[in-house]
Amino acid sequence: MSRRPAERRATGARHWDLLCALAAAAGVTALYAAAYVQRDALPAASGLIGHGIGIAGSVLMLLTATLYSLRKLRTDARWGSTAVWLKAHMVTGLLGPYMVLLHTAFAFRGLAGLTTLLMLVVVASGIVGRFIYTRLSRDAGGATRWRRALATWHLIHLPLTWALFAAAFVHVVAALSFATLQR
């Protein structure tokens, strides 16, 4: 039996965050692929394109970590619903790391490689958190169990996120220092 049009629209509206992240990732991939075709090689992580993508991805990740958290602290409805902010958090939480992954030019060595690995762990943790969150909103009978799971997830996800930002900060400082010392 097929779903009614209203149900199909509700499903599409429920997943607009993933669709936005996929569309934006497709756009970034097209730009990256064009740079690849033009050079006949992956853009270097230290080049203009690599740095640009890395900086933009890092800014998105910082926005991911800060804006949603700040919105949760505000009780004023003028800031919009937390549900919309959570969806935006998920879009930037997928797109930013993807852009940083492109920045690496798929070379995973040293501190940068460790930072990339930590970033992938944080993204995976975020996907687990989204799964738990959707179960919480759907399972009225087991809400206590899913609330505990979400609280436990939070205790893991937040420190991982801050460890990621600390490692990324060290990476940026080291990269800038080495670039300056090499001149």
Image (tube, rainbow, N blue to C red):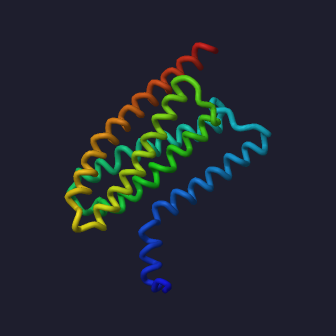
Q: Find residue 174 and report its horizontal and vertical position in percent.
A: 51, 20
Q: Quadrant of residue 146?
A: bottom left
- The image shows a total of numbered marks equal to 0
Task: Give percent across and percent down for residue 157.
Answer: 34, 42
Q: Is residue 121 above or below residue 111?
A: below
Front residue of 131/5: it is 131
Up-down relation of residue 23 to residue 172 (above or below): below
Q: Nearer the viewer, residue 34 or 14?
A: 14
Q: Name the side, left or right, on which 55 lies relative to 33.
A: left
* Picture quadrant of residue 183: top right
Provide residue 56's location: percent of width, then percent of height.
Answer: 53, 42
Judging depth in this view, the residue of 165 and 133 nearest the camera is 133
Q: Is residue 71 above or below residue 38?
A: below
The residue at the point 78 percent across, 45 percent down is: 37
Q: Is residue 162 left or right of residue 176?
A: left
Residue 113 location (% of width, % of height) = 54, 29
The residue positioned 63% from the left and 29% from the top of the image is 46
Q: Is residue 60 left or right of residue 143?
A: right
Which residue is painted at 52% across and 57% down in the image? 21
